[in-house]
């Protein structure tokens, strides 16, 4: 399900034994968190707060983040986009050039040696525009798109909602460069489809609505991808039948537009999980990024930008996929697909099953801690591992294992022999899916 | 050779076609770089300078960085260490607690909302110590080790030498936590071996010397890993026969120590590519991190820290593995193993060969640009792709391809048929290796 790059557990197999793992769930939720996602993610041992709006990712949380980012990365490659890694330390000059040094109020500003003004990048138009401008100066080199997945910074007045609004966060930003509005529009639509594919792959299947938002100078609207969630910090208006949504900020202004005629909007809460924006020549003009056309004339390049907050998605998934027992992540982004809970002390039987599963290409957690079954079941639910496999007395006597789905509560027996056959045939993942 | 996580080229195969790739080599070296590594890496299209000591990684450079970091990550897992991702934005309070807010002169300091003092992490002892302290409070939970691979920041007075001394850089830091000096010592030796394995895997085979350096309070020495390089910024003294080295900073003080008796030291230049340090209880004491011993008494945890500058390694490899024609990277960290240079216009023949190579699991660059053969050969050498496969008239007439090693200049013919057989048998990588 996930490639070997995600195997942070060990090199000898995708197996994490909790007996030797320090970052296990806590017995009680944190006292200093108010949002559901932070409460759950901290208690489950996925993250820790360093200060308001700034979190450390522990191994289980980092694994979720990595899986999300790998899904995003794969879709960006499918778009034909090239990955770069851009600096966080920006010189004041590039932000002056776009006039944003004084207008963007979330810039962390500081002095470097030589009394030079610096800021931390909350976004990277100021870096990517002249960079691409150096390489793509003629129509023959366009269109092109470039993306980055990295840490960004915003000096938010009021960070809140755990991972949903942070001062330091992980983000994918894609920037595209075009010679015509038609080409920009066409790519914009491809990215829209790509985003729905990403949200579907990470488990936000029917939760996400393309939402009209304020557009800026170059287009009437930008678009947000809003995931429905009762605890979401955004209000949107959705026509569920027509699958049209409008952000609260512009709803009053635009609801009577002809395109929204006959819509039946309902007010709902949602979390913004992505946004896409036509920049036109705003940034290329600032940096005097002109390209040479086929008729040898020059014209400004047209740009689009497309963001997805990958660490915010970890928080959004925790808000949307959780219940009174804890996290309940989709299989594709859970830190492991399967947790083995041994209720008996029989190393041989346990090791046989673990060895079997190493060949399954699943990520497996083994709760071999010296704690009671209740504690193990509680933690398995809290971490939200999609499938739980219990090894007990029935395993010894009859070779029977009990498998339970975290999402549906469905249970099913399987014998060690059947498990072995399924793993060898490469059909165990499918068997688990069918359990749900 | 590398896993699919490195395939940034496309999802449909590990093939990069230069005709659609913007970040190709420049015709001439940059005027604003003085170091060899920055001149080469910028001209080859691997990196770009944003400001002094701050670089963007372009796709080819990012790929080298990713390959190095994946080798490092794999070795850290082999040590049984767990990966975390820690914040860059640190509150002043944790740096006051260790007394380093005022003593570390490379801290980038800034104000956040609420007039709070912040700094950017140049290292992470202040974050990791209390974090591990929360989870590992008894001897049963120790030893443990945790690592991070991420961006760090140092307000260097004089950044220099391209990627060798940056203000923003990528770094792996490993931190270990122990209950006894013996256990710390034992792990310290394991890390030493692990580091040599890393340097060997990235191609720095016999270049790296474990070098005595100043130790601090808790041990007489720390150790640096110094890679011999004429352009290196460090001076070390090496006994090549005994494989002992001493850093310039302490050479005068310690050269008469009994342990260095009969050594025959030569002064050489080198690049520091790693360092390891016994911290003792310096940081655990600052954070009052005590663990409960088996006799129920409390004692401070003993720590070690172990760094490798992964972006610096990109620079070090460029300094060490290059010649008058450009970069000459080891196969394991080159952006691609093979570059195909078509000298003729025959899409069918070219596509057949590319299709073949997709099955080889090699990373392949195809120089299908509309430029002359001389330009293509020059760029292939500049990028330092280890093997060059020329498709020309002989390919059409006799099915013969010309393969050339960048490192040795050795050439060998291979027919398309032979190539196909080797790829199917999984032996083409070996065939290439044998060419050197």
Image (cartoon, coloured by chain):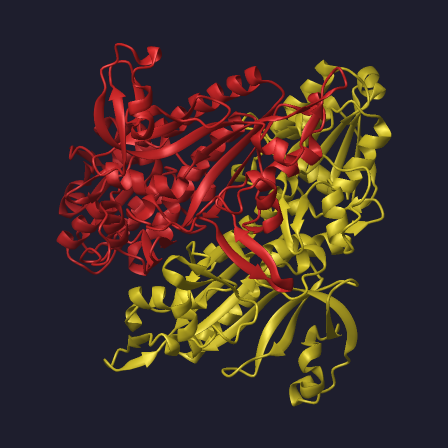
Chain colours: A yellow, B red
Q: For this view, does A278 lie left or right of residue B291? A: left
Vertical relation: A138 (above or below) A388:
below
Vertical relation: A180 (above or below) A324:
below
Vertical relation: A109 (above or below) B59:
below
Residue B419 percent coordinates (x, y): 28, 35
Identify the image quadrant of residue B56. Answer: bottom left
Vertical relation: A356 (above or below) B345:
above
B319 or B397, which lies in front?
B319
Q: For this view, does B410 lie left or right of residue B174? A: left
Residue A140 percent coordinates (x, y): 29, 69
Q: For this view, does A404 lie left or right of residue A89? A: right
Identify the image quadrant of residue B271. Answer: top left
Say if residue A303 shows up in the picture.
yes
Residue at 68% of width from left, 39% of height from top? A430
Residue at 71% of width from left, 37% of height from top? A431
Residue B39 percent coordinates (x, y): 23, 51
Identify the image quadrant of residue A47. Answer: top right
Count of marks, rendered view: 0
Residue at 44% of width from left, 47% of height from top? B105
Say if residue B356 shows up in the picture.
no
Residue B103 percent coordinates (x, y): 49, 44
A167 or B324, which lies in front?
A167
A340 or A183, which lies in front?
A340
**Which quadrant would the C terminus of chain B be assigned to in this image?**
top left
**Which quadrant would the N terminus of chain B be assigned to in this image?**
top left
């Amino acid at each position: 399900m996930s490639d070997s790059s995600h195997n942070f557990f060990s090199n000898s197999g995708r197996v994490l034994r909790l007996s030797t793992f320090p970052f296990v769930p806590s017995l009680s939720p944190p006292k200093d968190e108010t949002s559901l996602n932070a409460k759950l993610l901290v208690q489950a041992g996925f993250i820790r707060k360093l200060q308001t709006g700034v979190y450390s990712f522990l191994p289980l949380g980092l694994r979720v983040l990595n899986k999300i980012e790998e899904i995003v990365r794969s879709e960006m490659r499918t778009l034909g986009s090239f990955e770069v890694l851009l600096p966080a330390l920006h010189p004041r000059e590039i932000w002056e050039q776009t006039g944003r040094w004084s207008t963007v109020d979330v810039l962390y500003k500081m002095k470097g040696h030589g009394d030079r003004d610096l800021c931390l990048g909350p976004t990277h138009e100021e870096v990517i525009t002249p960079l691409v401008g150096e390489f793509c100066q003629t129509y023959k080199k366009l269109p092109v798109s470039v993306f980055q997945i990295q840490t960004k910074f915003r000096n938010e007045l009021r960070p809140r909602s755990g991972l949903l609004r942070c001062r330091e966060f992980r983000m994918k930003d894609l920037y595209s460069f075009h010679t015509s509005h038609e080409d920009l529009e066409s790519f914009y639509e491809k990215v829209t489809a790509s985003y729905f594919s990403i949200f579907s792959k990470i488990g936000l299947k029917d939760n996400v609505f393309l939402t009209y938002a304020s557009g800026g100078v170059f287009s009437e609207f930008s678009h947000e991808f809003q995931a429905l969630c009762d605890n979401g910090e955004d209000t949107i208006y959705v026509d569920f039948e027509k699958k049209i949504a409008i952000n609260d900020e512009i709803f009053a202004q635009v609801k009577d537009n002809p395109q929204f005629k006959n819509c039946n909007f309902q007010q709902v809460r949602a979390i913004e999980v992505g946004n896409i924006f036509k920049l036109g020549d705003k940034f290329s003009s600032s940096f005097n990024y002109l390209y040479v056309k086929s008729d040898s004339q020059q014209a400004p390049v047209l740009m689009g930008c497309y963001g997805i907050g990958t660490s915010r998605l970890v928080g959004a998934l925790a808000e949307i996929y959780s219940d009174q027992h804890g996290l309940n992540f989709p299989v594709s982004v859970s830190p492991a697909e399967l947790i083995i809970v041994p209720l008996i002390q029989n190393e041989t039987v346990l090791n046989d099953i673990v060895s079997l599963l190493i060949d399954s290409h699943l990520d497996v957690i083994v709760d071999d801690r010296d704690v009671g079954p209740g504690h193990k079941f509680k933690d398995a639910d809290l971490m939200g591992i999609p499938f739980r496999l219990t090894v007990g007395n029935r395993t010894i006597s009859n070779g029977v294992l009990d498998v339970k789905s975290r999402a549906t509560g469905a249970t099913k027996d399987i014998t060690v022999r059947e498990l072995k056959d399924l793993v060898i045939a490469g059909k165990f993942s499918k068997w688990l899916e069918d359990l749900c």
